[in-house]
Amino acid sequence: MSVTYRHVEPADISGLARIRAAEWGGEDYWIARITGYLDGTHNPQKALPPRILYVALEEEKLIGFIAGHLTERFGCDGELEWVNVAPEHRGSDAASALFHLLAAWFVAQRATRVCVNCDEENSRAHRFYTRHGAVPLKPHWLVWEDIGLRTHLRQ
C-alpha cells in the first residue's frame, strides 16, 4: 500500500495521541500535550516558533508523525520533538521519510544544528537517529551538526 505525507490537521490529533499513548501515558494526556505544542501553549525548554508536524498515512489511516521546532537549547537551531510510527509499521520507510521532510523544513528555516532528546536505553530510537547522521551531544541528547546533509541522503 502507498504511504502519503502531509502537514498535520486538527482532526489528526486524536490519532497522534493514540500512537504516543501506545508507548507511554494516556490518550487524553497526549491530546492536551500535542494540541498545546501546536498552538504554542506547551513549550519545550528554549523552544521558539515556528513549529511543524507532519503525518504519514497509509490509505486514510494515520501510521506515524514527526514534530520539530526552532530552539536555542544547547546552541542548536532546531529540535526534533517527537517521531512515532505505529508498531505494525515499524521497519517500514515511514519514519525515514518523515525525518527527511523535517530535515528539509529545518533547512528552509535556516536551522542546521538540530538536537534530539533520546533515552540511552531506547536502542531502537538511538539506532534510528545515528543511522540518520546524529552524533552524541551529551547524556540523553544527540545532535546533527548540519541536518542539511541529511535532506538529500536516503539511507
Image (cartoon, grey):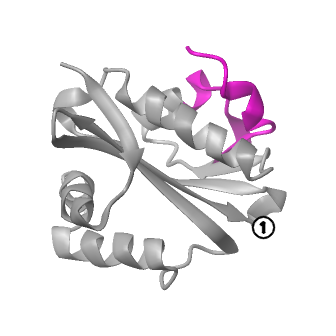
The quadrant holding residue 123 is top left
Which amino acid is tagged 1? Glu
> Residue 101: x percent and y percent?
54, 37
Of 100 and 90, nearer the camera is 100
Q: Residue at x 19, y 64 (%)?
A: 14
Q: Residue at x 65, y 72 (%)?
A: 49
| Position of residue 136 in the picture relative to residue 38 (left or right) | right
Q: Tell me, yes or no, whether the highlighted magenta stretch contains residue 135.
A: yes
- Specify the quadrant that holds the N terminus: top left
Of 60 and 35, nearer the camera is 60
> Residue 13: x percent and y percent?
26, 64
The quadrant holding residue 152 is top right
Q: Residues within 10 Å of mark 1 (few under 14, many from 20)?
A: some
Q: Helix, strand, or loop for circle 1?
A: loop
Q: Tell me, yes or no, whether the highlighted magenta stretch contains residue 131.
A: yes
| Residue that sits furthest to the right in the current view | 75
| Position of residue 60 in the picture relative to residue 30 (left or right) | left
Q: Is residue 103 visible?
A: yes
| Residue that sits furthest to the bottom in the current view | 41
Magenta stretch, residue numbers: 129-155
Q: Residue at x 47, y 27 (%)?
A: 96
The quadrant holding residue 100 is top right
> Residue 145: x percent and y percent?
81, 38
Q: Residue at x 22, y 64 (%)?
A: 11
Reply above or below: 41 against 78: below
Reply above or below: 147 against 19: above
Reply above or below: 139 against 121: below
- Specify the quadrant that holds the C terminus: top right
> Residue 45: x percent and y percent?
63, 75
Residue designated by label 1:
72
